[in-house]
Image (cartoon, grey):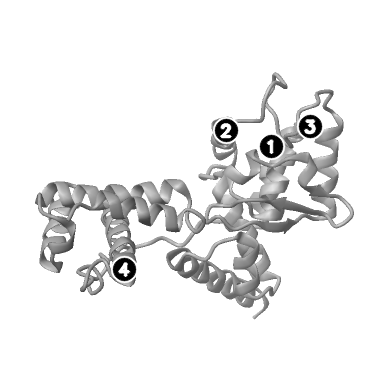
Amino acid sequence: MEADMYIEKFKDDYQFRMAPRTIRSYQLAVNQLQEHLNIPFDVITSKDIRNWLMMLKEKGYKPNSVQGKLIGLKTFYKYCLEEGIIPIDPARKIPFPKIEEKLPNYLTPTQLTSLRDCVEGQLLERAVIEILFATGVRISELVDMKKADINWSERSILIPEGKWKKGRVVLFSHACGQHLQACLDSRTDSLPDVFINQEATARIRQQKIRTHFQSYSKHLGCRVTPHTMRHTFAAHLAQKGMPLESIQELLGHDHPHTTQLYARLYNQARKEMYDKWM
């Protein structure tokens, strides 16, 4: 039994639940396993999968990469079992490799002030920083923002389609709104995008924003990225007392691994606030 037909069926059924890039990575894992073993996917055993994962490790694959392959296999085989394509799920009982994960890095109030200081007078860069910090959006969601999706009276922005195909509404502060409005008022173009390139010909590229953050890192003396702002957003709300479930809803994620990671960040941020007052 060849996997191609069932992978296509899997892609069709999951296209509204997962990002295309995620589905492609799962497809790649299944294809790589089958090509390595050169046997039909429905006769592959748990031992076969374990041996393949061990081979990847011996070849120098990082634990995160091996884990990603296993997640893809588990998701695909679980789907096949539920659809009655296979009688036994060979990947179900295989444990994930142990990974020493560092706590997500986030900025302290002092570092956040320094970051704002280093973009003083730069309307677009300041607006980008304020939006990332106030809303917790991903960089991909930021560059996709449209002016029509901003609700100024509610101080909210519609994020139509996030990483996991879930639309959501994010909120922004009054101060953030002031910087965003100043950035938009300085423009003379008619582009629908919230953030545009220097030539005012198209929306800003992710790489341009990442380049800005590389210079911010030098200024602050520590590594800061657009995703650091997402972590800072979550930590800030945790310190303010917002429940973890509400923060996760604003972040727009429900992946178990990411949920666990942000739970650790949440607990650390709350502990820091407790230590400050004790």
User: Which residue was labeled with disc 3?
Assistant: 121
Which residue is rendered at x = 71% and y = 43% of the image? Answer: 116
Q: Amino acid at mark 1?
A: Cys
Query: Mark 2 = which residue?
Result: 215
Q: CA distance from mark 1 to mark 2?
A: 9 Å
The quadrant of the picture occupied by the N terminus is bottom left
Q: Amino acid at mark 4?
A: Lys
Give the CA separation, mark 4 to mark 3: 53 Å
Q: Which residue is mark 1?
A: 118
In the rendered structure, are the residues bearing label 4 and label 3 in contact, judged by CB atoms less than 8 Å apart?
no
Q: Residues within 10 Å of mark 4 (few under 14, many from 20)?
A: some
**Badge nearest the viewer, 2 or 4:** 4
Q: Nearer the viewer, residue 151 or 195?
A: 151
Left or right of 156 on screen, residue 209: left
The secondary element bearing badge 1 is classed as loop
How far, Cα to Cα, is label 2 from label 4? 45 Å
Write down the residue under mark 4.
Answer: 78
**In this image, 40 relative to 150: left or right?**
left
Q: Which three-letter amino acid code belongs to the residue tagged 3?
A: Gly
